[in-house]
Image (cartoon, rainbow, N blue to C red):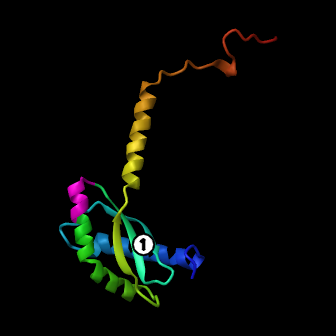
Amino acid sequence: MRKNSIKNTRINGEVQKELSTLISREIKDPRINPMTSVVHVEVAPDLKTAKVFISVLGDEESKKATLQGLRSAAAYMRGQLAKSLNLRNTPELTFVIDNSIEYGVHMSKLIDEVNKNIPDRPDQEDGMEEGDQRDH
């Protein structure tokens, strides 16, 4: 199976959906931040490993604690994946913090800040500039 094949893309989506459900509903580790989401999953073509990109809304301490909690629950989650997904191999899970959502929110705030500081242009009627005259 190739890395970007339709089958691999489908498996990535299924694993992502299952892990999202497991993390939000079944894992009761107090270290895991309730605002944790699975952003993306990359399952290797041989189905032996999966890189799970997670986003955690919170400070660095909360991110580290969540990562530790997820790593300690990885074996349980792998077992649950084996039960729910019919795969030849159940991938070993590796969790990685993904800051892309946080980065996007930060960039959006910066853009809003810049837009606040730009004075509004006076509205032009019918697209005419000052000094333009109409033929009647």
Whether 64 is among the magenta residues is yes
**Where, quadrant-wise, is the N terminus in this rendering?**
bottom right
Residue 17: in sight, yes or no?
A: no
Q: Residue at x 51, y 80 (%)?
A: 45
**Where, quadrant-wise, is the C terminus in this rendering?**
top right
The residue nearer to you, when weighing 45 against 7, is 45
Q: Is residue 95 left or right of residue 69?
A: right
Magenta residues, as a range? 58-65
Q: Residue at x 42, y 84 (%)?
A: 48
Could you tell me residue 111's position as x and y percent?
44, 36
- Give above or below for 51 relative to 108: below
Q: Main secondary structure of the magenta part?
A: helix
Instruction: Examine the image and state in which quarter residue 81 appears.
Output: bottom left
Residue furthest left as drawn: 30
Q: Residue at x 21, y 64 (%)?
A: 65
Instruction: Examine the image and state in which quarter residue 124 appears.
Output: top right
Instruction: Examine the image and state in which quarter residue 18 appears.
Output: bottom left
The residue nearer to you, when weighing 2 against 62, is 2
Could you tell me residue 107's position as x and y percent?
42, 43
Q: Which residue is mark 1?
A: 16
Residue furthest right as drawn: 136
Whether 101 is among the magenta residues is no
The residue nearer to you, when weighing 126 against 87, is 87
